[in-house]
Image: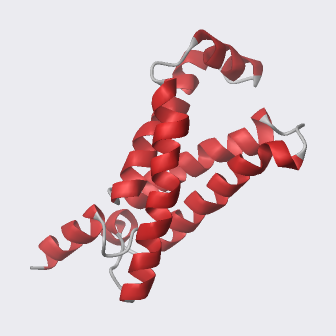
């Protein structure tokens, strides 16, 4: 796999698969952006304190990283721009939410972080498909 394929995908999918990826990207990207990300910019004192309580060094930096992953990553996955790296950062953040932040909670309280984690991992592996900015970039480069 080339770096170009890693960043923008290879484009070798069916139209039905591409449509499914579009639905998945919007279904996880937009809620991540609007319901979880944008409200964390700038990170509140409580969010920064929560980051410190999880043991992260430089809690302000890591709070910003999580907030930007959820906001910018959610947007980029939804529109399909740098989809795989964006999905990786959001999946990593959701992994921290599921395993660390809510690690002691019952599964019902961590379920949303798990669903987002799985969804972003799926997009990270599959890529954006052709109905995405990445697909447009791929087509432009091929011409």
| Above or below: residue 101 compared with residue 108 | above
Horizontal and vertical percent position of residue 123: 51, 65
Residue at the (45%, 31%) spot, across then down:
38
Q: Is residue 16 visible?
A: yes
Instruction: Using the rendered view, name the quadrant where residue 41 is placed.
Output: top left
Rendered residue at 49%/73% (across/down):
126
Q: Is residue 93 left or right of residue 22?
A: right
Image x and y of residue 78, in percent: 40, 55
Q: Position of residue 32 (x, y in %)?
A: 52, 45
Q: Quadrant of the N terminus?
A: bottom left
Q: Quadrant of the C terminus?
A: bottom left
82 above or below 65? below
Between 84 and 44, the residue placed more toward the observer is 44
In the current view of this chain or complex, which residue is farthest to the bottom? 14
At horizontal 61% and vertical 42% (from top left) the residue drawn is 93
The residue depicted at 84 percent of the width and 39 percent of the height is: 103
Q: Residue 21: where, in percent of width, then height?
A: 45, 72
Relative to 126, is 95 above or below?
Answer: above
The reply to whether residue 69 is in sight is no
């Amino acid at each position: 796999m080339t770096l170009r394929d890693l960043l923008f995908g290879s484009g070798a999918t069916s139209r039905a698969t591409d449509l499914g990826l579009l639905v998945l990207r919007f279904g996880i990207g937009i809620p991540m952006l609007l319901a979880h990300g944008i409200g964390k910019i700038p990170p509140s004192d409580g969010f920064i304190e929560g980051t410190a309580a999880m043991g992260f060094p430089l809690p302000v930096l890591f709070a910003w990283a999580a907030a930007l992953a959820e906001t910018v990553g959610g947007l980029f996955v939804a529109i399909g721009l740098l989809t795989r790296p964006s999905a990786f950062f959001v999946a990593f953040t959701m992994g921290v939410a599921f395993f660390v932040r809510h690690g002691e909670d019952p599964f019902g309280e961590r379920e949303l972080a798990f669903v987002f984690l799985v969804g972003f991992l799926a997009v990270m592996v599959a890529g954006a498909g052709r109905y995405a900015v990445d697909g447009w970039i791929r087509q432009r480069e091929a011409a």
